[in-house]
Image (spheres, rainbow, N blue to C red):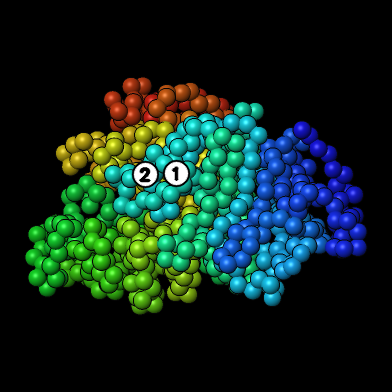
């Protein structure tokens, strides 16, 4: 059913005093170009619900909004509209780093003040911001005697679909996002079947729910993606699925210790609940809805944050060539004191090894080095229930000289990226956080990769609950105080907080490249990344660690491999966005490889980005202009199906010639049968040129576009 609201009349009548006349039953707000519209209504019992229209057609039907509290009645019925007001915003702000320099933030806002008609007359507001690319809405609880402390046991935010869309989803796991995506109709979602994955260190899926971002394609061909923005001092939101009624409802991550989901004092606001709406799949990626719903930069000058490509003592451990622990056995089921540890020579984080990587990075224009396994504690972490106090974040192993590695790196123009693995014992990290970040600042280290592998301590808290959301934020704030950017692994989801705290430079939050090296289920299938681009990547930058050139991992891991072609590994530097990109393979595997030139050349910080074409889970082609230059780079990837991709270069400036270097799948390339078959060729192009690429099964293409001299 299509509804039409006269927006001018709405704006003239929004200030309505409760009790003077009967409150309106429906209020409305449209996006700046009238593309999207939200209707908020009260039913006969004083229940609040909303609907969303796109081009006049209902896409989210009658969906109710309510809360349940500890020791108080639910806030669900008997409500009235006290007043409402509208506002508009049309600004352009600049990303200090990102997919594009300038971001347009253009929306119309409607705030509705609600109050119970009967005692205790509790109050809350619903605030909608409606954009041409979707909408966000949040709840605000003002200061009030009747509700000074809010203990939420359930937030019941509904999303009622109008048909049975195709959905790309991972289960609503309270502990981890490292699940493979499933592709099913909405009514076939079964998250419970994903419990107890053998390759996951921690997992808890209590409901048939999905994690966000969750992306859908409706039966009418419309694309929807549901997520949240500005997750601050609140529990992460999963979406409980009602497959019979084609509806979702918020299911906040809880705590077995406290028995509730969220505890706050008024006044406070919840995160934004977001719905991205697109007629074209690529518009989901181009949307900046999530970052726009966050507050502006609080840190001021962040010139110390440096997007970069880096190498690391990392992949060799996943291959089993070296270990994180000093003894060099990586036997996590037995442990002896460091004083009694007898090194075997397998330890990866040695001064000598770090200098080798620094030399390689410096010779190839790569600006960073990550060193994992440098600090004491690795002998006693995975598999142990009691991991409190295990890691020391300032004490190095005897064969690693931290200050010397930093000095040598600076001499060569390579910055050290610190590594802090907490082993999911965040209280230990909290106790040492000041010392850890003071050490980084004293050495001029401006980036750290944090990790939270394992079941959370204390038992009963979960990685995505309010307690951990606040821990991750403490680390981010502490990093900002010491000018350290944070790349968090096993993190809470990205919700656009990078706008407010630009030192939230990247995070994992997905099933990464390392699963190809050690998982027993065949690794990440070829469809994985064409799904990730339209799901996880919508929330923010990813540290995926691309660039593996030795696709078959024998003899190190004879049963494992990378399920892409070599050309796709290059394309990922453009497609899977992150401002810190790793050349993840061993240096020896890049030696003498002509394709390595693309990794050396490709940018990491962008002036603008354009999604040229794509379909969720099938393929995607993205072009990005390097910030501060006229260079463009294109990446295109496909799933297990070979396909022809046509690229129109009309985004290039007119009357300017470019040298195009094309790294494409060879004629006989195939992700499993012949992954290393690659073709490299050059041609001259301009903005009238069109390219036709043949992507192999599991393949891709990477293109450098450099202004011709």
The residue nearer to you, when weighing 625 against 462, is 462
Which of marks 2 and 1 precedes in the sequence? 1
User: Which numbered disc covers residue 185?
Assistant: none
Tell me if residue 74 can be seen. yes
Q: Residues within 10 Å of mark 1 (few under 14, many from 20)?
A: many
**Going 78% across and 49% down the picture, which residue do you hit?**
44
**Going 18% across and 42% down the picture, which residue do you hit?**
556
The residue nearer to you, when weighing 388 against 400, is 388
Give the structural element (helix, strand or loop) at label 2.
loop
**Going 53% across and 52% down the picture, which residue do you hit?**
251
Number of marks in the rendered image: 2
Residue 330 location in percent, x, y? 17, 57
Residue 500 location in percent, x, y? 57, 64
Left or right of 163 on screen, residue 550: left
Left or right of 8 on screen, residue 261: left
Left or right of 444 on screen, residue 293: right
- Residue indicated by mark 2: 195
Left or right of 527 on screen, residue 244: right
**Going 23% across and 61% down the picture, which residue do you hit?**
384
- Residue indicated by mark 1: 171
Image position of 197 with respect to 69: above or below:
above
């Amino acid at each position: 059913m299509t509804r039409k609201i006269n927006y001018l009349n709405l704006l003239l009548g929004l200030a309505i005093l409760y009790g003077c006349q009967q409150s309106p039953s429906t209020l409305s707000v449209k996006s700046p170009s009238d593309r999207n519209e939200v209707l908020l209504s009260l039913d006969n019992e004083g229940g609040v619900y909303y609907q969303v229209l796109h081009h006049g057609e209902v896409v989210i039907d009658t969906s109710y909004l309510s809360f349940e509290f500890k020791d108080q009645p639910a806030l669900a019925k008997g409500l009235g509209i006290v007043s409402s007001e509208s506002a508009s915003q049309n600004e352009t702000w600049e990303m200090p780093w990102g997919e594009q320099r300038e971001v347009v933030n253009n929306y119309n806002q409607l705030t509705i003040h609600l109050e119970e008609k009967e005692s205790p007359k509790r109050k809350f507001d619903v605030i909608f911001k409606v954009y041409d690319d979707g909408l966000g809405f949040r709840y605000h609880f003002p200061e009030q005697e009747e509700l000074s402390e809010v203990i939420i046991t359930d937030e019941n935010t509904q999303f009622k679909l109008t048909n049975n869309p195709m959905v790309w989803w991972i289960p609503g796991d309270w502990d981890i996002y490292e699940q493979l995506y499933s592709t099913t109709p909405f009514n076939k979602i079964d998250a419970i079947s994903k419990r107890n994955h053998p390759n996951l260190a921690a997992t808890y899926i209590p409901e048939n729910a999905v994690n966000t971002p969750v992306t859908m394609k409706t039966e009418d061909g419309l694309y929807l993606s549901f997520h949240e923005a500005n997750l601050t001092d609140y529990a992460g939101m999963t979406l409980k699925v009602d497959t019979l009624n084609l509806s979702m409802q918020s299911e906040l991550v809880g705590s077995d210790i406290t028995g509730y989901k969220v505890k706050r004092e008024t006044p406070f606001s919840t995160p934004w609940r977001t719905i991205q709406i697109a007629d074209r799949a690529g518009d989901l990626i181009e949307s900046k809805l999530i970052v726009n719903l966050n507050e502006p930069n609080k840190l001021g000058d962040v010139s110390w944050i440096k997007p970069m490509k880096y190498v690391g003592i990392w992949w060799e451990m996943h291959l089993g060539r070296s270990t994180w622990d000093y003894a060099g056995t990586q036997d996590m089921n037995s442990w002896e004191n460091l004083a009694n540890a007898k090194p075997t020579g397998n330890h990866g984080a040695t001064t000598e090894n770090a200098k080798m990587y620094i030399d390689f990075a410096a010779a190839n224009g790569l600006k960073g080095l990550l060193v994992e396994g440098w600090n004491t504690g690795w002998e006693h972490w995975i598999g142990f229930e009691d991991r409190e106090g295990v890691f020391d974040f300032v004490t190095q192993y005897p064969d690693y000289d931290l200050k010397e590695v930093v000095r040598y790196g600076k001499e060569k123009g390579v910055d050290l990226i610190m590594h802090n693995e907490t082993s999911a014992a965040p209280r230990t990290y909290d106790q040492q956080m000041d010392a850890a970040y003071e050490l980084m600042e004293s050495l001029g280290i401006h980036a750290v990769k944090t990790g939270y592998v394992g079941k959370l301590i204390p038992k009963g808290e979960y990685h995505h609950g309010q307690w951990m959301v606040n821990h991750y934020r403490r680390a981010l704030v502490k990093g900002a105080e010491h000018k350290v950017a944070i790349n968090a692994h096993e993190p809470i989801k990205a919700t656009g907080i990078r706008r407010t705290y630009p030192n939230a430079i990247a995070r994992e939050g997905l099933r990464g490249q390392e699963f190809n090296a050690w998982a027993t289920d065949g690794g990440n299938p070829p469809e994985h990344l064409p799904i990730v681009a339209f799901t996880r990547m919508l929330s923010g930058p990813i540290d995926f660690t691309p660039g593996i050139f030795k696709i078959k991992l024998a003899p190190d891991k004879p049963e494992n491999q990378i399920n892409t072609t070599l050309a796709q590994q290059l394309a990922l530097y453009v497609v899977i966005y992150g401002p810190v990109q790793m050349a993840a393979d061993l240096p020896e595997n890049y030696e003498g490889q002509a394709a390595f030139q693309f990794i050396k050349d490709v940018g990491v910080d962008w002036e603008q980005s354009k999604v040229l074409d794509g379909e969720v889970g099938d393929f995607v082609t993205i072009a990005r202009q390097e910030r501060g230059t006229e260079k463009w780079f294109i990446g295109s990837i496909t799933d297990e199906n070979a396909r022809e991709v046509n690229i129109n270069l009309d985004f290039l400036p007119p009357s300017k010639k470019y040298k195009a270097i094309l790294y494409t799948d060879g004629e006989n390339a195939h992700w499993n049968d012949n992954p290393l078959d690659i073709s490299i060729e050059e041609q001259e192009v301009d903005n009238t040129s069109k390219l036709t690429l043949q992507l192999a099964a599991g393949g891709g293409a990477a293109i450098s576009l450099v202004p011709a001299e």
